[in-house]
Amino acid sequence: MPKFKLVISNPKTGKAKTFEVEGEKAVPLLGRRIGEVVDGSVMGLGNVKLLITGGSDKDGIPMRPDVRGGVKKYVLLSGGPGFHPRKKGLRVRKLVRGNTITEDILQVNLKIVEGDLGF
């Protein structure tokens, strides 16, 4: 059974809260991609719409929206997410995770699009 740590941010207040979902409440997130809107009531969070903005897996490897699927892959990066260059023009080959949520993902970052969770 999947288990996710949800980091939900509220752009109106600038605050974020973490929630843990597992089992039946976590299943609606499987197979979703970065940029999709998810209904929070399915996960027991009330009447709210959430936008998936990213995440990381159990080893801390970040998800990237431009890598397809749920695979780990070495990609040449010149900017974030996953790499922040110290000098202009610096490029590095780094290991990143794809844009699809699988059971290997531990943390999912979400943003409130519609509704309110009270923070």
Image: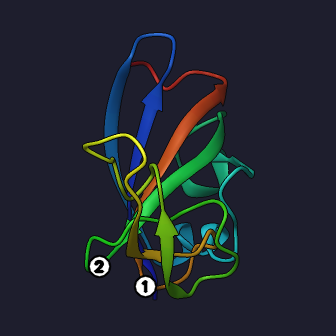
Residue count near mark 2 (Cα–Cα under 10 Å), binned few <14, some 14–19, many ≥20: few
Q: Of all residues shown, which one is farthest toward the right?
A: 36
Image height check: is 47 above or below 94? Answer: above
**Residue 59 in the figure: left or right of residue 114:** left
**Nearer to me, 10 or 33:** 33
Residue shown at 71%/50% (left/top)?
Answer: 35
Among numbered discs 2 and 1, the one appearing first in the sequence: 2
Q: Which residue is mark 1?
A: 104
**Nearer to me, 75 or 101:** 75
Q: Is residue 106 visible?
A: no
Residue shown at 27%/70% (left/top)?
Answer: 60
Residue shown at 39%/16% (left/top)?
Answer: 14
Q: Which residue is mark 2?
A: 58
Q: Are marks 2 and 1 in contact (CB under 8 Å)?
A: yes
Residue shown at 46%/88% (left/top)?
Answer: 1
**Residue 55 in the figure: left or right of residue 61:** right
Disc 2 residue type (three-letter)? Lys
Secondary structure under the numbered disc 2 in the rendered image = loop
Q: Quadrant of the C terminus?
A: top left
Residue count near mark 1 (Cα–Cα under 10 Å), binned few <14, some 14–19, many ≥20: some
- Toward which corner of the image does residue 67 lie, by quadrant? bottom right
- Toward which corner of the image does residue 86 lie, by quadrant? top left
Secondary structure under the numbered disc 1 in the rendered image = loop
